[in-house]
Amino acid sequence: MCSAESPHTSQPSTQDAVDALMRAAQWFFPGEQSADRRVLYREGGRGADEFYRERWRHDREVRSTHGVNCTGSCSWKVYVKDGIITWETQATDYPSVGPDSPEYEPRGCPRGASFSWYTYSPTRIRYPYVRGPLLELWRAARAQHVDPVQAWASIVAAPDATRAYKQARGKGGFVRSTWGEVIELIAAAQVHTIQRYGPDRIIGFSPIPAMSMTSYAAGTRYLSMIGATISSFYDWYADLPVASPQVFGDQTDVPESGDWWNAGYLIVWGTNLPITRTPDAHFMTEARYRGQKVVVVSPDFSDHTKFADEWLAAAPGTDGALAMAMGHVILTEFYAKRQVPRFLDYARAFTDLPFLVTLAEHHGGLVPGRFLTAADLGGGAGTENAAFKTVLLDDATGASVVPNGSVGFRWAAEPGEWNLNLDTDPALTLHGRPGAESVAVDLPRFDCGNGEAGAVLRRGVPAIRVDGHLVTTVFDLVMAQYGVARDGLPGEWPTGYDDAEQPYTPAWQEAITSVPAAACTRVAREFARNAERTGGRSMIAMGAGTNHWFHSDQIYRTFLSLLQLCGCQGVNGGGWAHYVGQEKVRPLTGWFHLAFGLDWQRPTRHMVGTPLFWLATDQWRYEAFGADVLASPLGSGRMAGRTLPDCNALAARLGWMPSHPAFNRNPLDLCDEADHAGKEVPDHVVEQLKSGALSFAAEDPDDPANFPRVLMVWRANLFASSMKGHEYLLRHLLGTDDAVTATETPPELRPTEVRWRDEAPVGKLDLSVAVDFRMTSTCLFSDVVLPAATWYEKYDLSSTDMHPFVHAFSPAIAPPWQARTDFDLFHTLAAEFSRQAATHLGVRRDVIAAPLAHDTPDELAQPHGLVRDWKAGDCEPVPGKTMPKLIVVERDYAAVAEKMAAIGPLLDTAGTTTKGITWVPDAEIDYLRRRNGTVRGGIADGRPSIARDDQFCEAILALSGTTNGRLAEAGFRVLEQQTGVALADLAGERAGDRITFADTQTQPRAVITSPEWSGSETGGRRYSPFTVNVERRKPWHTLTGRQHFFLDHEWMAEFGEQLPTYRPPLNVLAHFGDPSRSDPGRPEIVVRYLTPHSKWSIHSEYQENLHMLTLFRGGPVIWMSPADADKIGVADNDWIEAYNRNGVVACRAVVTHRMPEGTVYMYHTMDRHLNVPKTEVSGRHGGGDNSLTRLLIKPTHLIGGYAQFTYGFNYIGPTGNQRDEITVIRRRAQEVEF
Amino acid sequence: MRVMAQVAMVMNLDKCIGCHTCSVTCKQTWTNRPGSEYIWFNNVETKPGTGYPRRYEDQNRFKGGWALNRRGKLKLKAGGRLRKLLSIFYNPELPSLDDFYEPFTYDYEHLTTAPLSDSFPSARPKSQLTGRNMSPSAGPNWDDDLAGSGTYAAADPNLDGLAEQVQLEFEHAFHFYLPRICEHCLNPSCVASCPSGAMYKRVEDGIVLVDQDRCRGWRFCVSGCPYKKVYFNHRTGKAEKCTFCYPRIESGQPTICSETCVGRLRHLGVMLYDADAVLAAASTKDDKELYEAQLSVFLDPHDPDVIAGAERDGIAHDWIQAAQRSPVYALIATHRVALPLHPEYRTMPMVWYVPPLSPITDAVHATGHHDDNPDQVFAAIESLRIPLGYLANLFTAGDTWPVERALRRLTVLRTHMRAQQLGDPVDADLLASVSMTAEEVEDLYRILAIAKYDERY
């Protein structure tokens, strides 16, 4: 304590008598006065400092983090005093980035800083709860039945009884129970469901493993063991950029935030970095001082706009138009008028631009067909994988060449030619080539017309004939698509940038986006020029603002095109920086195999979340348009009459997408049937399908046999945060009150291949279980609520794409009250399940219908992406070729708990496989035996233990290349064999490193360069994706092995999206009608309804945290412009209601001039349980932001079975987008009732 | 000359992302206890906006700080001691609960305990003061990001006289963030206002504190502080304020708000100043000269005379060294990019600010003014959205030149470093235009951009 010095008091100079008097009377203290008598110095008096000194004192600091899907993955110090968590501050000890860059400290945000409030807050769930009506039923049934499974069976056998407890969902009435009672109930429901309907009728939902890998894996490992359906989340959240698998053949791989520092030019396009990347936003603000220019494209003046040099206020959802026009400028100025050698070299080596595409006849014109392949060449036909080897022209000789690197080489019998080495100089264009003819091609445009389908553009390309095929290059098609005129080519071309009639000029986009043409042109030019001067260091940070649209894949492709044209991908400081969702589990291999129990059996039942919930919640019954509405005017017409549910069913039966529950019969029974018939299970299933005796569940989602029956949600607020169509969920899946006013699909628009049942089911779900530490809407609507440990009460691991570190969760205190960790919960459940299952299930065989898988030879299943429907007689149903693979898995249901707690033997034999690279972690298994201890006796005798959460963390790290240098190097050796290029040196410098769990508890640890990812940290550089591809010529996982501009799956042509294009937001008003009620005297407006990420929450987490509520408006709000507010007589902070056909919201208005007219924001996510009154529109409590949204499936997201379109978990699938929605807003009575 | 040392802070508003992490960590550490619910030692304000408490900058109403009387003498704006004595039981300048907010919580338990009904439960807001149902209508950051701008931003006292330049319309929108703590002034009016002698400025580091034992709860410090950074704890009946985290500072740790600032925009350091020169400087006649006057009080820690004086006046050797390496001194005195907040309050505040750059205006967009040269990517200061006059009202009592100089220096820094990044030659004319050498620019770049932990503090 520093009390030796004398404190002093400063006082004003005083001269008048009054002051002197006053001082004598009131302010007399001993001390030394300064000469001017202004200051009085006094000694002592420091004892009072003690108050704050004591406040600061604490006993312990514990390193942990927050397991919330924010991408932060920040390391925090949790302070403990007298055994109580007091507060938290950020760790500042991240490994250094080097002397010339800002560091990763102190990462964190206000949400995380407020977390400890939850620990002892009144919203903390302290005990297990069951809603009264169900608990009464259960206790009565248990009194009658000694066997809990029979007790559950007796409950669900009585529809009247189940209806009563289902109707009570969400209406209070929780009764405190015990762990023993609740676990028995859940296990009984699961055992019964497996027995009666099949294990795939049990659904598990938990998102974002990277935010707490072990907690995620505990649940999915259990569910994998029992054969349950595990929902994806990345696509379901609409965070998956479908353009990434389409263009890169990669789920998502992006630069760490420290790499923004290296960018010379940054466009921030649909991601509000200060709000959504709070811990890392400083790299952007600081890079400006290094000379980086920042351009923000955002419809409102937002937190990030403040930092921009320029603000382009594009109208919501029109970003694709702006990017197309920027592409037009770049192609014109950097490819047509002037050539930049680096751009050309990059385009030839790393993109599909030089590849040849056939031109097909269509209604008397020509349209782009498909990639020319070796199978089309005289000499190439019949060679190995010929239909999967794409072709280009040698620029000098004009000869057709089949270069290395395409997917045909990847899966060749003799490996070593899957690389991007070119021993030829590809011709980028045929323009001016001897023998080339100029032909007109027809291209779809979607910017005009009333519906979605648009019109046709006719523009010319140079073409030649190769072995009888009329072909052009992708580049020439791109030039035509973007409207860059070249001499001698026919068709309609823009007269210049100021031609507003012709797409895709700067003047054309101005009318759509409202961004001045001059600004569009200038930014495009600067962006490309910067890339030219810096070797590709131009970057676009993109996110939910541009990715959550129905056509976001197209929006993103227009962005990616800018980057590829300027040679920015695979360059530090350049490329796409897509940040939506904490998707990067850096120690991927160990986590993936343990999380899905692949050490004991393969595969698991992964499911695409969007179709799962779209069918389960019956949103498919409310479609107002079919696939044909979205089809290209140049399509074949094959979409005529095809509805979206039909498309989904097709994707299921062709093996494109997973579809669980799979069949309208119990998959365990299917195996028994096959046994009885003396047949192989796959043969039996195919036979039954062909005969029509068996059908896919997706073909009859409302058959009670196909209902999801039991749902477990942990680490998620599924029903509120991500449930687009929340109110439909309430009605159909849960069976409680809802606010849907939409009408069902009229008969003429109903599906033909999916059965329509006149009576829509209500309350499909028998049991809904929520695990959480705070009372969310998901908890409130669930039957059973279990108290979870918080992030300061358990061991776990965290990683993110934003930084290259792995670090630990550690318990600062033991879980208080009756809380348990997720890990503990699932092991408890597994033990009880195994006990009950021993008598009811025993050992059974289970058949899994698995889709054609990415990064496997399944990519070769469906040549040219031609759609062959076995059901329509186009071909035979052949598992793994024209339909899903049918894989039989044996399940020892009594041994689930034992298997969960040990690493199974499959890793020793089958090894681990990530992105097509397999290695055997034999030394690691042995290490884990010694490190974690060895299981003695039982089914797992002699195996390494993972019975505890810290042991599980240790195993994840030991089994992954990013955290175990030996495996990284071994993986690169395998990849070297596949590619024939040198790679192992990338891991060489750290081949001896092993990051242990204790290491991650000490300090965040920088990961090791590994073939699990596409970038390199070698030598301490910042992670940027695809640097290995560019620098080592390792192919992308696509058809051509290059980044794609052109996509030739038949459906991409059918929907007019072979090339990047602009598709406007869906015309929701036209499709679904004007939802206005038009009550007299009640002015209303219809506006675009957007739900951006909130400043005061991470999804729904923290939104009810008192600190966050205090720091803004204390409850749900909708932001609107003064102009819109004036139209309906709304003042700031007035109560308003927002409604549409999907539901209704009651909240307060925020009126501000930073919002554009015609658009409102309801920041995602306000739960519906706090400060939400009853609405005038429904008479019931208002909903949350997802009460106004609903799911819409984009058919092209269902494509599979072909090259980069083949399925992977969270890699590809329909997105749960929600941005195209509209809402009505009106002022409501200001007296509200709760 | 009497050399004294002061710990001071510079916040770079050009880096502030408005995240409020500082507010939350400060609150969690210091003021999340009964009686201090509404007390925010650190808060962040959106500008333009009314701040917290609302319109605290309106000294016509609140009469905080100092003013010169007709004789040119420095007087508390709220009046002398007699007036204070007479108003000791009724202080008209004291901000009321309405100027702050009624702290609220929610009936969270209801979510778990709600009996079975036909309705979905909703946790209602409750007053933390009365426990009764309430409807929040004010808060410590109610106008975040221009929320309710027609009501709040429009009432920003700093906009007075700028009606021509500032239009609160979408096309002209701008905002930025202003994090605030106690200014730990060299001439603190709160200390001078205290009738109990409970407030003091520590001699070794200049931190201004309330003696919790001696405070009698008269609250003249609350009204006397023009920044409204002294609060009254209604539970303990004592005044409380930002302590500059002295338990941390004393053990060599940055303040909580600095330590946890994810924008990395806070710099802490020691400033040496001449205590004997404070009164004269604070009495400078022209408000617009107060900024320069305060600069003149600061002493160059590299000056041998200053070092000798400091040693003579008992300043420890390591404090002198700290003053020499102080990033705060560099930003305030060497590079002149940091400015005081409202020097016209005459308290000689010691938390200074680097003003923010902003996007270019719409007019520039429409014309595409420099589209002939794609290598010239940065706009001129004149075309930025935030009017210089507005910033000048905040930082320099209306004198736009110091603000303009700071912004020009930031822009030149960016241009210079971009040229370096691209390998372009140094533009000597450009550097001369802001009277800086390349080395000075690069030193400033290191402080602002690289900003390592051990160099921020």
Image (cartoon, helix red, strand yellow):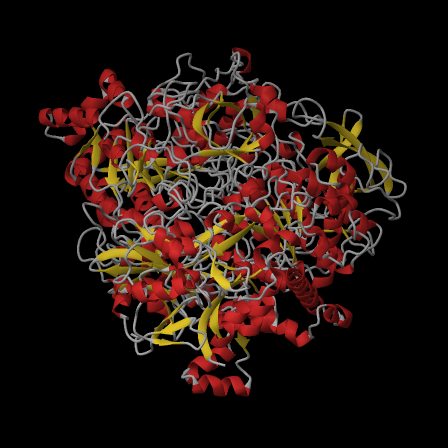
Looking at the image, residue A588 sits to the left or right of residue A536; the answer is left
The residue shown at (70%, 33%) is: A512
User: Where on the picture, by quarter, is residue B440?
Assistant: bottom right
Residue B278 on image: x %, y %: 50, 71
Along the line of sight, the residue nearer the viewer: A730 or A477:
A730
Along the line of sight, the residue nearer the viewer: A44 or A929:
A44
Query: Is residue A1068 depicted above or below B78 in this figure?
Result: above
Looking at the image, residue A807 sits to the left or right of residue A300; the answer is left
Query: Is residue B405 depicted above or below A687 in this figure?
Result: below
Residue A1206 on image: x %, y %: 53, 41
User: Where on the picture, by quarter, is residue A15?
Assistant: bottom left
Q: Total marks drawn?
A: 0
For residue A694, say whether it is visible: yes
For residue A381, say whether it is visible: no
Along the line of sight, the residue nearer the viewer: A1128 or A1056:
A1128
Residue A551 on image: x %, y %: 60, 34
Query: Is residue A266 depicted above or below A1108 in this figure?
Result: below
The residue shown at (39%, 13%) is: A759
User: Where on the picture, by quarter, is residue A404?
Assistant: bottom right
Residue B429 on image: x %, y %: 77, 70
Along the line of sight, the residue nearer the viewer: A32 or A192:
A32
Looking at the image, residue A163 sits to the left or right of residue A510; the answer is left
Furthest toward the front, the residue is A17
